[in-house]
Image: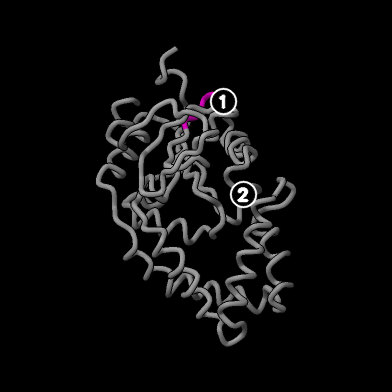
Amino acid sequence: MSLREQIKAILFDLDGTLIDVNLKLFVPEYLKLLASNVSHLVRQSKFISKLMVASQEVDKNNGNKTNEQVFEEAFFPLIGYAREEMNPLFDKFYEQDFPKLRQYTTQKPDAREVMQMVFKKGYDVVIATTPLLPETAVRQRLEWAGVPVDEFPYKLITSLENTSANKPNLLYYKLIAETIGRSTKECLMVGDEDKDMIAAQIGMKTFLVQSSNTELGPNTPEPDYQGTLADLQKLL
């Protein structure tokens, strides 16, 4: 059976795969901007350190709760404020300040073309990005990438709210397959890091897109395919 006959769903990582992101600038600036929105309640150093602790709890999520539930149960007690006090400030941040981070990203010219092609060919398409940020942040980054939600009817976009595991936990990939009603053998994971290539361990095919974030470890499964997004188009 050819790859075209076997694969029914394409899972795309976002950062480094569909859009180039300078994470060394993006992440610190993201944390600084977010912390500044709540600095009248929590000092920046405390806010960021507790945010990191809560994010580590999300990494341990075993599927019984959403990542959002795990994060909130860990985070708010650590900083001593209720979600009802903090979430309106977070909402304001994502609406007003998060768009400023676009300057640390660069569109990949082939991203839109490959997305148009996979939809035209009838694949189920999933945005399989690390689900540590809320849906609004993922939607904005998809817009920055030139593949916005209002133009592409994605089967699933993983986010903090709707996902119950985190990369590289294999449960993350199993849950995606279950949610879209496909077997793992019918899925192709396209990404730029070892936490994407790990999907091979549950039977998914993998395609590595090299980026500045690519650093495969000795135990990372060998990608089935690798190249650019233009190469992916030829493959499919």
Up-down: is 29 above or below 105? Answer: below
Q: Which residue is drawn at 41% across and 51% down?
A: 15
Residue 185 part of the magenta-drawn span: yes
Secondary structure beneath label 2: loop
Q: Real-space Cα distance between discs 2 and 1?
A: 20 Å
Mark 2 vs 1, N-terminal side: 2
Which quadrant: the C terminus?
top left
From the image, tell me which residue sits under label 2: 163
Amino acid on which disc 1 is placed: Gly
Among all residues in the image, which is located at the extreme front? Answer: 218
Among all residues in the image, which is located at the extreme left? Answer: 109
Q: Residue at x 42, y 42 (%)?
A: 192
Give the residues in magenta.
183-188
Q: How crowded is mark 1: few (under 14 residues within 10 Å), some or many (20 or more)?
A: some
| Residue 8 disc label | none
Residue 72: % across, % down: 68, 65
The coloring applied to the image is one colour
Q: Residues within 10 Å of mark 2 (few under 14, many from 20)?
A: many
Residue 100: % across, % down: 37, 70
Instruction: Determine which quarter of the picture holds residue 227.
Output: top left
Residue 37: % across, % down: 52, 80
Instruction: Determine which quarter of the picture holds residue 44.
Output: bottom right
Up-down: is 161 above or below 28? Answer: above
Task: Please state which of residues 216 and 223 is positioned toward the viewer in this rendering.
Answer: 216
Left or right: residue 17 versus residue 83 is: left
Amino acid on which disc 2 is placed: Thr
Up-down: is 121 above or below 77? Answer: above
Residue 74: % across, % down: 71, 65
From the image, tell me which residue sits under label 1: 203
